Image: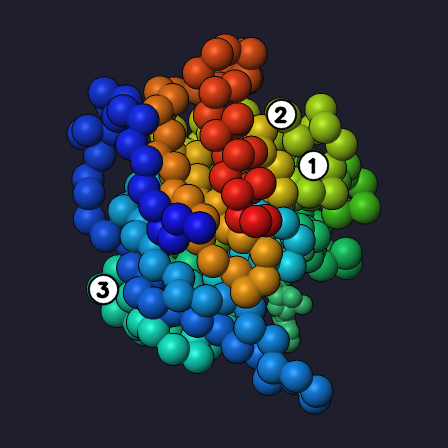
Amino acid sequence: MNHSESTHLGTAPSQTHLQQRTAVEVRNASVIYQTADTPVHALSDIDLHIAEGEFVSLIGPSGCGKTTLMRVIADLEHISAGEVLVNGVSPHDARLARAYGYVFQAPALFPWRNVLANVTLPLQIQGKGKAEAKRIAMEHLERVGLKGFEGKYPWQLSGGMQQRVSIARALSFEPKILMMDEPFGALDEITRDRLNEQLQQLWQRERRTVVFVTHSIAEAVYLSTKIVVMSPRPGRIVKVIDSPLPDERHLGLRDTPAFMELAHEVREALADGHH
Ligand SMILES: Nc1ncnc2c1ncn2[C@@H]1O[C@H](COP(=O)(O)OP(=O)(O)OP(=O)(O)O)[C@@H](O)[C@H]1O
């Protein structure tokens, strides 16, 4: 297995202009969960570098530690060995500095609050005044295409719209890093395609660092500037692939040879991880 191998398939011209400041640095990190019977070695010797503004997907078989790696970066899980730095500080300090926005598989909205109140609540908890929280929330709801839906309740929205509310909520804090754990996994394929396209456009506009967990090769290839392929437990990085695709993407790109070639490379790396 070729641990942490980096392949450069060429660099899209616009990527050369990206700021290359480090967002996340993971060095030699391992995670062992202590359970009642045997310890579970979830991650082993992880080395990963994420530059500011990158869209990074973690892909691998079920149980390989994708969520664990994301949780380690986001200070939701402790490493058993190694080192993790986020914006040059520990994940804990990064969290205190409100570096993270989280979007999980289930939208986690309060059913008794309307869309606006779901987005304003954490802002108000953070100490923002009511009017300011509303202004920020409306701005972010508009960015995810939900202007006009602020008075609706979660049960009045489709799953895709609910997920867009949670994206607006995560972005309303202007987080440095957006952590997304299979955010579209529960949605039908057409909705998922649309949200992929919208997320790509959002990333285009804001160039925020994104760490994205997915099972889907197509999703990872379509969205990412960097694809991190992981092996079954204990989770290791099999390959890190820097995408040669242009930064600006439309869904039609999926039918191009360059897209298919990259998807093939990811599939091969996933298969290698099983050996
Ligand atoms: N709190 C915990 N205690 C014990 N074992 C755990 C704990 N959390 C995760 N694990 C185990 O660690 C391994 C990695 O889990 P993790 O959820 O990170 O994988 P994953 O790649 O995100 O999986 P999936 O794709 O199915 O969501 C799994 O074998 C899981 O059962």
Q: Nearer the viewer, residue 138 or 212?
A: 212
When the figure is inspected, residue 186 is found, relative to residue 49, above or below; the finding is: above
> Which label lies toward us, 3 or 2?
3
Image-based side of 239 in relation to 218, left or right: left
Q: Can residue 177 be seen in this view?
A: no
Asked if the residues shown at circle 1 and circle 2 are in contact, with their CB atoms under 8 angstroms apart, the answer is: yes
Judging by the rendered image, the residue that carries numbered circle 3 is 88
Q: Which residue lies furthest to the front in this view?
A: 275
Among the two numbered marks 3 and 1 on one chain, the one whose residue lies closer to the N terminus: 3
Mark 3 is surrounded, within 10 Å at the Cα level, by few (under 14), some (14 to 19) or many (20 or more) other residues, namely some
Residue at 73% x, 37% y is 187
Q: Which residue is labeled 1 in the image?
A: 160
Residue sitting at x 59%, y 49%? 274
Q: Helix, strand, or loop for circle 1?
A: helix
In x, y percent, where is residue 273? Answer: 53, 48
> Which of these two is toward me, 152 or 33?
33
- Check mark 1 vs ligand 1: CB closer than 8 Å? yes or no: no
Tell me the tag on residue 199.
none
The answer to whether the residue bearing label 2 lies less than 8 angstroms from the nearest atom of ligand 1 is no
Mark 1: give few (<14), some (14-19) or many (20+) Cα within 10 Å.
some
